[in-house]
Image (tube, rainbow, N blue to C red):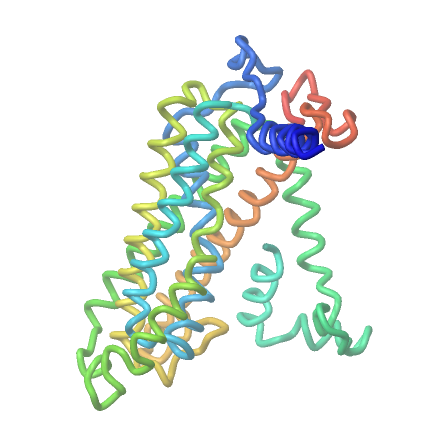
Amino acid sequence: MPSTRRLILGHVVSGLCSKMNRTKPVPADVMETPLSRCLNTFDITMLGIGHMVGAGIYVLTGTVAKEIAGPGIILSFVLAGFVSMLAAICYAEFGTRIPKAVARAWSGYIDSILGGVIANSTKSVTGEMHEQLFAQYPDFLAFIVCCVYAAALGIGVKATAVFNGVLTLVNIGVMTLVIVLGFYYADTKNWSDQEGGFLPYGVGGVIAGAATCFYAFVGFDSIATSSEEAKNPTFSIPIATILSLLVVTLGYILVSAALTLMIPIREINPAASLPDAFGELNLHWAKYAVSIGALCGMTTTLVGSLFALPRCLYAMASDGLIFSCFGKVNSKTQVS
């Protein structure tokens, strides 16, 4: 009996191990796809940058700097960028080996520029909701924006890449303007002990800030999901991943430094930190330029999110995990 039990136990353990270590066989024709392979390294890099640089740099930066890390947000972004790089390399490896494939912030920023007109008007009609996990009011603008962008993505992946690239370049230009003006009007007293020093919340604030800042880098997954539409995924996916993360991390660090040097952290407005900072310096033209950049950045973030979703559904449908209808590809646009 003991030997029989050992045999049964061994059989169970062996079966469990085989299931846990099973791998999906990669077909020989892995490069064949009904999708259009039309994206080059630049397109994919712009897609990654556009997806990551959005609400994070225009909203999250002010919140973390004022309430969590202070000027130490610079170190928070260094840590978050390093961790994101490790995670992104895993995505890049997967996308290379098997080359298959946030609208509330947007509407909130528009509303803050208009002085809360949208929120107040909606609340006057629908009233406020006080249920957990729900917003205070129905955000119809965010709903409309999602529908419009989703329809636009159906035109084709190359058109989407061009649109995203243009808006991303505008966003990078605005970030450059913020950095140049921020360091020009920098006051080192804002990092002095008089204002709480460089680490007013201590090392703990830097760590907590890094945990929050990590979400500013969410978006590199869109690079991996574009592998089936890349001309040369083996080269483009890892290079685009590393380049986009380096550019975004450097941008976050420099913008955070500029913001915390321009004004004391106690005067930062978390809802619209950069426009308000320039407003306090009476640089109203820069305030409006930053607002345009913020809208471009949030648009590319939303486009990146919507870009990745149908490709994830397509991959799951192709594997038989969900209904096969989600894996159908339009013969004209070659979009799922």
> Which quadrant holds the N terminus?
top right
Residue 184 drawn at (x, y percent): 19, 68
Residue 34 visible in the displayed image: yes
- 125 left or right of 292? right
Residue 269 drawn at (x, y percent): 44, 78
Above/below status of 199 relative to 290: below
Above/below status of 54 relative to 309: below
- 154 left or right of 174? right
Residue drawn at x 60%, y 29% as measured from the top left: 14
Residue drawn at x 29%, y 55% as measured from the top left: 176
Residue drawn at x 32%, y 39% as measured from the top left: 243
* Residue most extreme to the bottom: 194
Residue 13: quarter of image: top right
Residue 164 drawn at (x, y percent): 48, 40
> Which quadrant holds the C terminus?
top right
Residue drawn at x 70%, y 77% as measured from the top left: 120
Nearest to the observer: residue 64 or residue 186: 64
- 243 left or right of 44? left
Residue 109: quarter of image: bottom right
* Residue most extreme to the top: 28
Nearest to the observer: residue 160 or residue 223: 223
